[in-house]
Amino acid sequence: MNFVSDVTYYHISLVILIYGLMSLITYFTFRLSDMVVNTLGNNVISVIGKVMGLIIAIIGTGMVIEGIKIAFNLEV
């Protein structure tokens, strides 16, 4: 959204087009989710969920560490 701060009609239309494309991709992803689960199986979906949870935990931990460094002016 910050891309539109330098407003021209080209930039606005580009942002709207990309938003529409992402919405369409999300729609088809949800529509095909049953097929993906049936193809991969519940065990693979469970493993993917656990790996994604681990990745999110790692990102969150990194953000907390960076926040602490900034809050206390720590240089490491």
Image: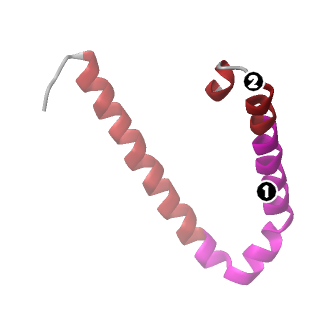
Element type at mark 1: helix
The magenta region covers 16-45
The picture quadrant where one finds residue 16 is top right
The answer to which of marks 2 and 1 sits earlier in the sequence is: 2
Q: Position of residue 62 (x, y in %)?
A: 33, 40
Q: Amino acid at mark 1?
A: Ile
Q: Position of residue 63 (x, y in %)?
A: 37, 35
* Residue that carries the numbered disc 1 in the rendered image: 25
- The one nearer the camera, 27 or 40, is 27
Q: Give the distance between the C-alpha atoms of the residues marked 2 and 1, in whole angstroms.
A: 26 Å
Q: Is residue 74 magenta?
A: no
Q: Amino acid at mark 2?
A: Thr
Q: Position of residue 31 (x, y in %)?
A: 86, 63
The picture quadrant where one finds residue 59 is top left
- The one nearer the camera, 5 or 48, is 5
Identity of the residue furthest to the left in this view: 76
Q: Disc 2 vs disc 1: Cβ atoms closer than 8 Å?
A: no
* Residue that carries the numbered disc 2 in the rendered image: 8
- The one nearer the camera, 24 or 57, is 24
Element type at mark 2: loop
